[in-house]
Image: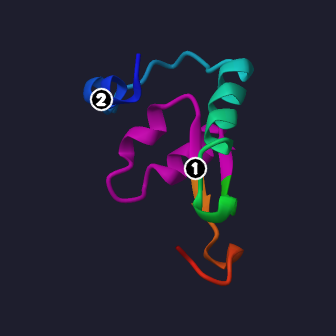
Amino acid sequence: MDVFEAVKIRRSIRAYKSTPVSKEKLEKILEAARLAPSANNIQPWHFIVVTDPEKRAKLAKAPFAGFLKEAPVVVVGCGDQKASPKWF
């Protein structure tokens, strides 16, 4: 499948199974995120993996994030604006 096809058929998921995500799958997802391109290869991001139900419930209190409570794992992407003297 090419990138255009992947973009065309993508969908948003808001209902999750309670099945845990395997460590191998999670590592593969994080590796793909780590390899994503960035301006000047700065890669000003960090990822926080949240599996604890209480922490997921706290995250779910954010606006439009109620669905996070039911997800077996949440990956929070964080950007660092100070990673470069010039933010692109």
Residue drawn where x is 62% and y is 21% of the image: 21
Image-based side of 70 in relation to 15, left or right: right
Nearer to us in this view, 78 or 32: 32
Q: Is residue 73 at least partly visible in the picture?
A: yes
Q: Bin the neighbour count of mark 1 within 10 Å (Cα to Cα): few under 14, some 14-19, many 20 and up.
A: few
Compared with 44, 31 (above or below) is above
Q: Is label 2 in a helix, a strand or a loop?
A: loop
Q: Is label 1 in a helix, a strand or a loop?
A: strand
**Residue bearing the label numbered 2:** 11
Q: Per the image, is 56 magenta? A: yes
Residue 14: quadrant of the picture:
top left
Percent of width and height locating residue 17: 45, 18
Compared with 81, 71 (above or below) is above
Q: Residue furthest bottom?
A: 85
Residue drawn where x is 49% and y is 31% of the image: 71
**Residue bearing the label numbered 1:** 76
Q: Bin the neighbour count of mark 2 within 10 Å (Cα to Cα): few under 14, some 14-19, many 20 and up.
A: few
Q: In this picture, which residue range is highlighted in magenta?
A: 47-76
Compared with 80, 45 (above or below) is above
Q: On the rendered image, what quadrant is the N terminus found in?
A: top left
Residue drawn where x is 66% and y is 20% of the image: 25
Image-based side of 66 in relation to 34, left or right: left
| Three-letter amino acid code of the residue under disc 1 | Val
Residue drawn where x is 68% and y is 26% of the image: 28
Q: Is residue 44 at least partly visible in the picture?
A: no
Q: Per the image, is 34 magenta? A: no
Residue 31: quadrant of the picture:
top right
| Three-letter amino acid code of the residue under disc 2 | Arg
Percent of width and height locating residue 80: 64, 69
Determine the CA span between mark 2 and mark 1. Answer: 19 Å
